[in-house]
Image (cartoon, rainbow, N blue to C red):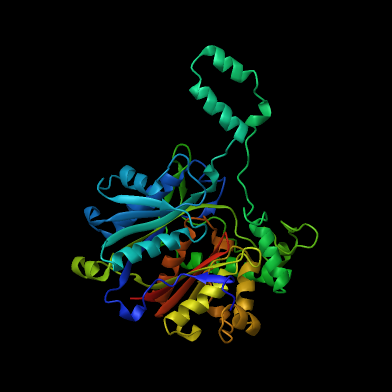
């Protein structure tokens, strides 16, 4: 295997050497809703406060026992430079609780959970809030560099004459808002364009993508109808006057069909593309949080346990190759590290950025050449479809960038509990060619 193909984080010790487990006490999330809709009056802070306060209330933990708050958010928040610390302060938690915020693209809240787990295993913390949020309805809109420099100079001008001199050179075009960049800085291509490259490389047809997307919606609709999401969702009163009650994900479509999906035009490659709005995850607002604790702490406090974090793996690949192929690397690696096979895993939660991206990952893991050249291993093989995203995924439920990882942790552990399974794997691709997986164990 070429060393520049992928770089793996191998700093963790073997799971067999751990004397204590990291318990997932609980997880909660807001409904995931379409951006620029019912949450348009919300902020990253307001939704984060809702889930942080709720998880403390539901579990009954002593707030003063919380050691740290770690939060993920992808779109920079100019209003909340350190969102995690502001969650502590604005929620009324003890001001002694520290907090920090990170951005690992779509892996962000998986990363907050990993860091929390590592701190617990090191004995530094015993109880940690780890979550993430994204409110694309409230994206900061920057101005041009010229406008920024002008405003900076104006703020430093010491006289009226100096200000008038600056104003005389102003170009009104400087103040036209700049929409947020959607392209990868390193490649200049958008996520969708990279996904198109993957579908061509792995021979993933439009029909296969639409079928996968339809299954995501139908699985999510069935789970919604059965009430499987009720335990994890905290309702939100939203709107300008807080008169809009939101208690479920609002993008799940039980009435969609292959015929309606086939009518949608390609979103990125207008001429030959196969990726559409129907087989992609939509822009989404939402927040999610996990409450993690040491096994000794939950025993001492007699707290409920949803499950355990066993291990995590992070990889990075060349963005020019297959940007979102990370799950095809991390799933085999995390199983190998823990002496498990795919048959040992009851549930796979593979993030659905695009149907073509998930199908490409599955195809690569079932490709002998890919496994030999990229993973330096024998054929991994096919993951049974009945184990993958059985309650739908981001195509139907939505994808608030910073919150998806925490949602997947809670969803996977609740499915394990309901079905009496033992292990689940969560795998998420991310911008920059990053992939991350987490191995979970039921109680």
Does residue 253 appear to the left or right of 39 in the view shown? right
| Residue depicted at 45% across the width and 39% down the height | 79
Residue 199, percent from left and from top: 70, 69
Q: Let me know if residue 189 appears in the view.
A: yes
Establish if 90 lies above or below 108: above
Residue 78 locus on image (x, y percent):
47, 40
Residue 95 horizontal/vertical position (percent): 26, 45
Task: Judge by depth and name the residue closer to the eye, 125 or 154.
Answer: 154
Q: Quadrant of residue 208?
A: bottom right
Which quadrant would the C terminus be assigned to in this image? bottom left
Query: Left or right: 440 with respect to 63?
Result: right
Left or right: 413 with respect to 223?
left
Furthest residue to the top? Answer: 161
Residue extending furthest toward the left: 300
Depth check: 361 or 443 in front? 361
In the image, residue 420 sits, relative to residue 116, either above or below, namely below
Front residue of 411 and 434: 434
The image shows residue 303, relative to residue 101, as above or below, that is below
Residue 132 at x, y = what percent?
43, 55
**Quarter in which the N terminus is drawn:** bottom right
Res. 214 visible in picture: no
Q: Residue furthest front?
A: 3
């Amino acid at each position: 295997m070429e060393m520049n193909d992928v770089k793996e984080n191998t700093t963790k010790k073997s799971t067999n050497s751990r004397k204590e487990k990291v318990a997932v006490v609980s997880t909660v999330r807001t409904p995931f809703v379409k951006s620029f809709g019912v949450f348009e009056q919300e902020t990253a802070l307001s939704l984060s406060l809702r889930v942080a306060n709720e998880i403390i209330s539901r579990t009954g933990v002593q707030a003063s026992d919380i050691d740290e708050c770690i939060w993920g958010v992808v779109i920079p928040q100019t209003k909340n430079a350190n969102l995690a610390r502001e969650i502590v302060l604005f929620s009324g938690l003890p001001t002694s609780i520290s907090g920090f915020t990170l951005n690992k693209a779509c892996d962000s809240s998986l990363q907050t959970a990993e860091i929390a787990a590592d701190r617990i295993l090191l004995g530094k913390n015993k109880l940690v809030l780890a979550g993430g949020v994204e409110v694309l309805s409230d994206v900061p809109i920057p101005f041009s560099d010229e406008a920024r420099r002008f405003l900076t100079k104006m703020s430093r001008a010491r006289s009226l004459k100096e200000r008038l001199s600056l104003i005389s050179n102003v170009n009104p075009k400087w103040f036209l808002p700049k929409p947020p960049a959607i392209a990868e800085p390193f490649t200049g291509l958008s996520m969708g364009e990279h996904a198109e490259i993957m579908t061509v490389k792995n021979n993933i047809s439009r029909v296969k993508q639409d079928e996968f997307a339809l299954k995501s919606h139908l699985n999510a609709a069935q789970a919604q109808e059965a009430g499987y999401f009720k335990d994890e969702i905290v309702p939100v009163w939203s709107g300008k006057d807080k008169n809009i009650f939101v208690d479920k994900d609002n993008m799940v479509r039980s009435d969609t069909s292959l015929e309606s999906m086939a009518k949608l035009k390609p979103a990125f490659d207008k001429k030959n593309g196969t990726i559409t709005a129907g087989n992609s995850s939509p822009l989404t607002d939402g927040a999610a949080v996990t409450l993690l604790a040491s096994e000794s702490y939950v025993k001492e406090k007699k707290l409920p346990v949803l499950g355990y974090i066993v291990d995590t793996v992070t990889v990075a690949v060349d963005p020019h190759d297959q940007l979102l192929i990370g799950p095809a690397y991390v799933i085999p690696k995390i199983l190998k590290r823990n002496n498990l096979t795919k048959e040992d895993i009851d549930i796979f939660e593979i993030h659905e950025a695009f149907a073509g991206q998930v199908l490409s990952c599955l195809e690569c893991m079932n490709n002998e050449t890919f496994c030999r050249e990229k993973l330096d291993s024998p054929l991994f093989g096919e993951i049974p479809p009945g184990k993958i995203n059985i309650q739908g995924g981001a195509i139907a439920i939505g994808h608030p960038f910073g919150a998806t990882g925490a949602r997947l942790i809670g969803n996977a552990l609740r499915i394990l509990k309901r079905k009496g399974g033992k292990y689940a794997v969560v795998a998420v691709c991310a911008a920059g060619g990053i992939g991350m997986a987490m191995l979970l164990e039921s109680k």
